[in-house]
Amino acid sequence: MKRLEIEQENIRNNILHKRDLLENYLTATAAFSYEEQHTPEQIKELLNSYYLILPYIPGKYHTYFSEYSELIVDGVMDESNFKRARYLIGNYIIPCIKTEIEKM
């Protein structure tokens, strides 16, 4: 009985950990959706959260997350890059994260 309780607690902790990582990534991403200028700390936070969630993201979405991160790191947020970033967020990143959270 105790072993089953421990296993359930481990599963619950893993789910909460994954959810926290995904939510932190969304929080970091939000800063780039609404602000024109970004600090090195904001960029670092986004990249750290990106690398932390990468193992939890299905492989078919890695390209979209990677492209979004590259747009941010490059720091050139002209109209074209801003539109592309918003497209990636709305069409791939948020739907992917939503699906991963719903699986929990």
Image (cartoon, helix red, strand yellow):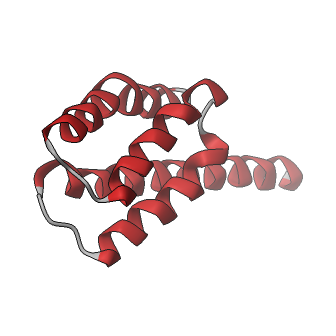
Quarter of the image with the C terminus in it: top right
* Residue 36 point in image, percent of width and height: 11, 58
The residue under the point 56% across, 50% down is 53
Q: In the shown orientation, is residue 93 left or right of residue 18? A: left
Residue 81 or residue 47, whichever sits in front: 81
Q: In the shown orientation, is residue 1 left or right of residue 55? A: right
* Residue 72 point in image, percent of width and height: 34, 54
Residue 44 or residue 52, whichever sits in front: 44
**Quadrant hosting residue 93:** top left
Q: In the shown orientation, is residue 76 left or right of residue 61? A: left
**Quadrant hosting residue 56:** top right
The residue under the point 31% across, 34% down is 89
* Residue 64 point in image, percent of width and height: 47, 33
Numbered-mark total: 0
The residue under the point 85% across, 55% down is 2
**Quadrant hosting residue 63:** top right
* Residue 77 point in image, percent of width and height: 20, 50
The residue under the point 58% across, 57% down is 52
